[in-house]
Amino acid sequence: MPGLALVGFMGAGKSTTGPLLASRLGWPFVDLDALIEEREGASVSDLFQRLGEAGFRKAERRALLAALEQPGPLVLSTGGGTLCAEENRASLRSWGETVYLEVPLEVLALRVGAGEGRPLWSEAELRYRARQPIYESCDRRVDGRLDVAVLVEQILEDMC
Ligand code: S3P
């Protein structure tokens, strides 16, 4: 399998689960938000402010394609909105597997502390509901409320 992408809403634990999973697999880890920031030379919040959401999504698309072009297997943590674009879903489908870290909105709100530094938290509830079917169309689903070490073992078991 060339790669595994972690999917879920802001605060679902993609960026904490990803490195641990990658190290268990002996695969590199790429955090898509971090890659966007590196490539664009600006933080996600700055990109939203400067370019608006549409501009950010273009940068996100470019970074996603760059990540998927890397040779060898990879664990990728996507941004909460990456899968909203059908073209991103198609690219990920032909690349590897997607795993949805499912966490209820109330738990996410507590974790994210009402979204400091995350530009879209104010519309969180609407977005959460709109994205649910997209997230649920992932290849696998795990309970993102589990302890991260347990979560990683579950993903590894599911992969066998
Ligand atoms: C977004 C989630 C963020 C980041 C950007 C947009 C979203 O990533 O990509 O703020 O649309 O849900 P995380 O899910 O890693 O916080």
Image (tube, rainbow, N blue to C red):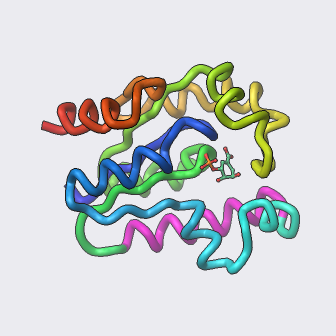
- Find out whether residue 35 is within the magenta segment: no
**Lateral position of residue 75 relative to residue 25, left or right:** right
* x, y percent for residue 52: 84, 61
Foreground of the two, 30 or 128:
30
User: What's the residue at 63%, 46% (across, down)?
Assistant: 81
* x, y percent for residue 86: 55, 48
**Lateral position of residue 150 relative to residue 121, left or right:** left
User: What's the residue at 64%, 29% (across, down)?
Assistant: 108
**Lateral position of residue 91 relative to residue 25, left or right:** right
Outermost residue, left side: 160
Q: Which residues are magenta?
A: 52-69
Magenta region, mostly helix, strand or loop?
helix
- Find out whether residue 54 is within the magenta segment: yes
Q: Quadrant of residue 37?
A: bottom right
Q: Is residue 44 above or below residue 21?
A: below
User: What's the residue at 51%, 54% (across, down)?
Assistant: 88
* x, y percent for residue 146: 41, 25
Q: Is residue 85 above or below residue 155?
A: below
| Image quadrant containing the N terminus | bottom left
| Image quadrant containing the C terminus | top left
